[in-house]
Image: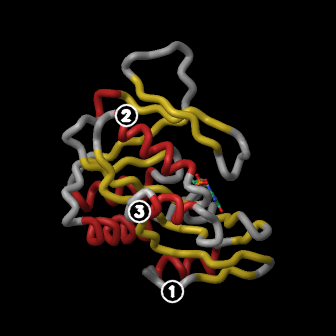
Amino acid sequence: MKMLEEKILAEGRAMGEDILKVDSFINHQVDPLLMKQIGEEFAEHFKDKGITKVVTIESSGIAPALMTALALDVPMIILKKQPSKILNDDLYQTVVTSFTKETSYELTLSRKFLDENDHVLIIDDFLANGEAATGAIRLIRSAHATVAGIGILIEKSFQPGRQKLTAQGFEVYALARVAKLGKDLIEFLPEE
Ligand code: 5GP
């Protein structure tokens, strides 16, 4: 997506060879017009998949996921990064290893929001090792719902996330695919 790539080139900052900082338009300050266009792009791409809900992981996925849900006219669900204090029968939970923070967190979904009739689109800001998306898939499957696809704003194609997910048969649609990061360098793969 040209608009996203241009924004990344103008405002994104490579933190070494691994991490791209996008806090002026995605992660901290949010660009509403860009999020609207992203939502419309995902909705257009996945419109014939019979999606009943959009699922994202708090917090950076919320803005684009909400815009996608709005364009598809379905609800959005936020998977919460919160540890359960007591074992709770009303929740599905799974542990995810965080790429940027090098820690683990518990991802939580209330049982009341997904069931076997749901066909879910997962939206997240970044795809690196695929841990967050894989955790989301585990929770969706715990609820006996199915995964329609995975929409990613920025895929770091030099990391194994896409390969892991497509090897399991999931469709990954990424709006910007970063081939290489370095000092003053952000290189993209051609658009999908
Ligand atoms: P994964 O689970 O695929 O390894 O990593 C994806 C998650 O880690 C995303 O939800 C995102 O929050 C975070 N992440 C991974 N790589 C980056 C990065 O280069 N920049 C930022 N800002 N977040 C990242």
Q: Nearer the viewer, mark 1 or mark 2?
A: 2
Residue visible at 71% across and 71% down?
13
User: Tag count in the figure?
Assistant: 3
The circle on residue 190 is 1
Q: Residue furthest front?
A: 167
Is the residue at mark 3 in contact range of ligand 1, meaning its CB lies under 8 Å from it? no
Name the amino acid, label 2.
Answer: Ser
Name the amino acid, label 3.
Answer: Gly
Residue visible at 33% across and 27% down?
111
The circle on residue 142 is 2
Scheme of image coloration: secondary structure
| Residue 146 position (above or below residue 6) | above
| Residue 3 position (above or below residue 12) | below
| Coordinates of residue 37 in the picture (x, y in percent) | 37, 71
User: Quadrant location of the N terminus?
Assistant: bottom left
Residue under pointer 3? 151
Answer with mark 2 or mark 3, whichever residue precedes in sequence: 2
| Residue 147 position (above or below residue 8) | above
Residue visible at 55% across and 82% down?
6
Q: Residue furthest top?
A: 86
Name the amino acid, label 1.
Answer: Pro
| Coordinates of residue 163 in the picture (x, y in percent) | 53, 65
Alpha carbon separation for disc pair 3 and 1: 17 Å
Which one is in front, 75 or 95? 95
For label 2, the SS is helix
Dot 3: few (<14), some (14–19), or many (≥20) neighbours within 10 Å? many
